[in-house]
Amino acid sequence: MGHGRNPLRTSAVGALSATLIVAAGLGLAPTAQAAGGTSGVRFVDISGDGGTTLKANVITPAGGDGTRAYPLIVLPTSWGLPQVEYLVQAQKLANSGYVVVGYNVRGFWQSDGEIDVAGPHDTADVSKVIDWALANTPSDPRRVGVAGVSYGAGISLLAAAHDKRVKAVAALSGWADLTASIYSGRTEHVQAAALLNGVGHVTGHPSAETQQVFKDFFASNLSKEQDLVDWGKKRSPETYVDQLNKNGAAVFMANTWGDTIFSPNQYATFYDELTGPKRLEFRPGDHATAELPGLFGLPNDVWTDTGRWFDHYLRGADNGIDREQPVQLKSRSTGGYEGYSDWKSVGATTRKIALEGTTRIHANVDSGADGGIIFLSSILDQLTRIPPMASIPLLPRYWAAVWQSEKYTSAQHVRGTARLHTTVTATKGSGTLVAYLYDVGPLGIGKLVSNAPYTFHGQTPGQPFGVDLELFSTAYDVPAGHRLALVVDTVDPLYIEHNPSGAQLTFSSPEHDPSYVSVPLREQ
């Protein structure tokens, strides 16, 4: 790990954690009070896996005569949020004819047990909640759905893979590959993990295993790397995709382009592997910011489509959602949606930017090119279309490598996943690099299009090696008269870096293996 770094950014991330918790508590409490006076709402205790008590709320359609069975929707809560999180949306679903059970996942707030981080106990809890609902509410066992935001989304996908009764899923701002989410490119996403860890300690009871995983993660304990991978694999829907496909649940997934906790790439990869009914939506924003307004009852595309998904696959409504293009993208630069037949069609055309010549940079210093600040930067981009920026001409070439495309005569519609291929020679056996793709205007100001980190270990100093890196997927329009620039440096506040003191990285483009960044473009 680099010397003199503050890997946790403790004060900034801690303050953000506290702000989110307070906002959730203040904002959601009135929701609970409003819903509490509605007919059909009751708060119950449900016995989860191993007898652990889960605090839950149940909303049933008004006016039931006791002879009719309604489709059931189970809503596991998000990480660190109380069980009232979904009451507004639950009431809307109940008004549409669903029995809805929302519950606090184990280890958080009033629920008993310890935080299992979507482990086997959490998966089994969903089945226990379904069991309880079928025995105690007018629910139809043939029409069961599970949905959730963030933590609840991951648990929902896992439940659908393990319980054949689940016929439809809505996984909002979740993950498919937990390890790839917080450890992509073998690089610790420190701000994201610190936020999760901080909120977990404030609002819940992390298990000893959970605490040890975070401890090893922040310490960059390479001897525990395989343990981290195995721990994450057990908690990744990706691991159970064959089971999920066999069960045949209809899967709806939605996320944001700037999600700094669960990057969009792993959802896109997972979507391609699903063989049943499926839908994928991406919008501007950061983690769960697209769904948040809907939790307060405001008009919201994500929750509207969630309702349409369940209406079709649980109630048989002919609402057309199954006939729409299943991949729906909203560009960060425009306000409209674009439909695609599959994810592969999103970036069907690519344009390469050659990374010519030989460039050497020195490690351990932030050049000024950064991925931003967790939540704040992507929310700013979502609301004002102002992403993190840097003056490309002023970036110090001592610490940053810079390549630029020609000036484009027409707009370039970047869609999908940009890929970096290059050859690196390091003076040390370990190191970290961070790649950034910028939209550069006439004055040289670069607006961040995408980024991604890459860490290597065990390389022979002075020996060239190849690097292939996927940048985080996005949808961004580069105006005519602008350029694209690739910038590479070694330090970013979002990530833990592993550059020994005095390390240098040399980027080259051998004739037999040229270096480039491949940019996916929407066909004009």
Image: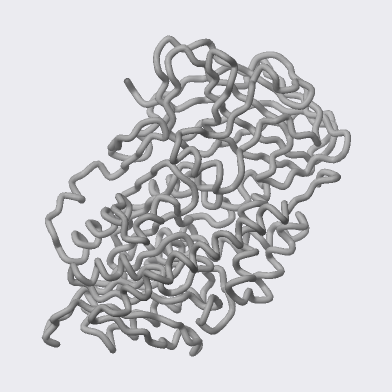
The answer to whether residue 393 is above or below residue 25 is above
Say if residue 226 shows up in the picture. yes
Residue 126 percent location from the top left of the image: 41, 76
The answer to whether residue 216 is above or below residue 482 is below
* Near-viewer residue (224 or 267): 267
How many numbered markers are drawn?
A: 0
Instruction: Give the quadrant of residue 326.
Output: top left
- Way the structure is coloured: one colour
Residue 300 percent location from the top left of the image: 31, 52
* Near-viewer residue (303 or 464): 303
Direction from residue 64 to residue 119 in the image, left or right: right
Direction from residue 344 to residue 421 in the image, left or right: right
Direction from residue 441 to residue 231 in the image, left or right: right
The answer to whether residue 309 is above or below residue 416 is below
Residue 291 percent location from the top left of the image: 39, 54
Say if residue 245 shows up in the picture. no
Query: Which image quadrant: the C terminus?
Result: top left
Rendered residue at 57%/24% (across/down): 446
* Near-viewer residue (151 or 224): 151
Rendered residue at 36%/65% (across/down): 147
Direction from residue 369 to residue 247 in the image, left or right: left
* Near-viewer residue (507 or 371): 371
Rendered residue at 52%/31% (across/down): 449
Instruction: Give the quadrant of residue 85.
Output: bottom left
